Amino acid sequence: MAKIWVVAEAQDQKLKKVSLEMITLARQLGDVEALLIGDGVAAIAPELGNYGVSKVIVADHADLQSYTAAKYARVLSELIQRDQPEIVLIANTATGRDVAPRVAQRVGAGQISDIIDYADGQFIRPIYAGKAFQRVTAVAHPLIVTVRPNVFAAAEAVGGTAAVETAAVSLAADDLRVLVRDVVRQISTRPELTEAEIIVSGGRGMKGAENFRILEALADVLGAAVGASRAAVDAGWRPHQDQVGQTGKTVSPTLYIAAGISGAIQHLAGMSGSKVIVAINKDPEANIFKVADYGIVGDLFEVVPLLTEEFKRV
Ligand code: FAD
């Protein structure tokens, strides 16, 4: 059986949802082993056994407390060279996108990026900003595959235990040239954009930063994250980390509500993988309606508060 590695992501001693999503895919591909890299991550290794992972390799070291590409690429590539897994799944997150190609280059592997499905032995990935889908067959191994978050269902717990191996970590001086001095966390009660099941996004139609209050009220009722188009970010109404699209974040929530967003190709590139898209726009010809499952032609300043009131009732 092919040996499939899942590079699990964790934060604050908790597995990120995308780690469980990658396990779902990995189970279709072969025998699943997981890697945990960080400081203090050994504590969560046993949990992975619950999800059908046969072995967890833990690289736990104080120097790995903060992510840098050099450190993580060193650890990952040495372990891959040592154990020769056939396929290594890495989340297509900011850190995953950063480290995956470095690892692929070091171990001489091919890479398939940002996959959203696997069928008939082929990995499927969107291309041309989501306008077409490419089917890719691997012809050589090892293979690095980055997996888009929120696309595969999170693995269900199946019970069981995994063997846990502690890997020796030896970082060279070269790997430590970049030092992370401080990590500034935004305190928010809302889910992180790329992990959110529901996203409420606003664009230039919001007409000002203060008007995002109505989207936030809707987001609070739905337990949603708040996103924005680039126009709203460029206007200074929202921080860049909220931007959805080609030069922002790629999201695939179950529900994406776009208010006052025209649906430019660069915005669609970041959200067209959402399962259900609801668009609110006063222009019936707006491009966003071409990808929307439900379209509301109307003034968002009337529609959004009405939706909030209705959802409060549910
Ligand atoms: P607009 O296109 O101005 O649309 C505003 C919409 O609001 C209109 O459809 C209007 O009918 C509607 N509206 C106005 N008032 C109301 C109201 N009261 N009620 C209801 N509807 C109303 N864009 C991104 O979003 N993300 C990216 O990552 C991104 N990357 C880019 C990268 C490059 C290289 C380039 C060139 C562009 C990029 N863009 C990106 C910009 C993109 O091309 C669009 O300019 C941008 O998405 C437009 O944002 P918008 O839809 O909010 O604004």
Image (cartoon, rainbow, N blue to C red):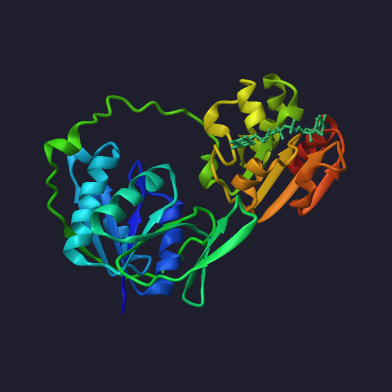
Describe residue 96's horizontal placement relative to residue 313 as left or right: left
Residue 257 in view (yes/no) = yes
At a point 86% along the width and 43% down the height, the residue shown is: 285
At a point 28% along the width and 70% down the height, the residue shown is: 54
Q: Nearer the viewer, residue 301 or 265?
A: 265
For residue 102, above or below residue 107? above
Q: Residue 29: image x %, image y %?
A: 40, 73
Describe residue 252's horizontal placement relative to residue 99 as left or right: right
For residue 187, above or below residue 306? above
For residue 197, above or below residue 119? above
The image quadrant where one finds the N terminus is bottom left
Residue 314 in view (yes/no) = no
At a point 75% along the width and 23% down the height, the residue shown is: 207
Q: Nearer the viewer, residue 136 or 201?
A: 136
Ligand 1 positioned in quadrant: top right
In the rendered image, which quarter is residue 82 located in?
A: bottom left
Describe residue 23's horizontal placement relative to residue 189 as left or right: left
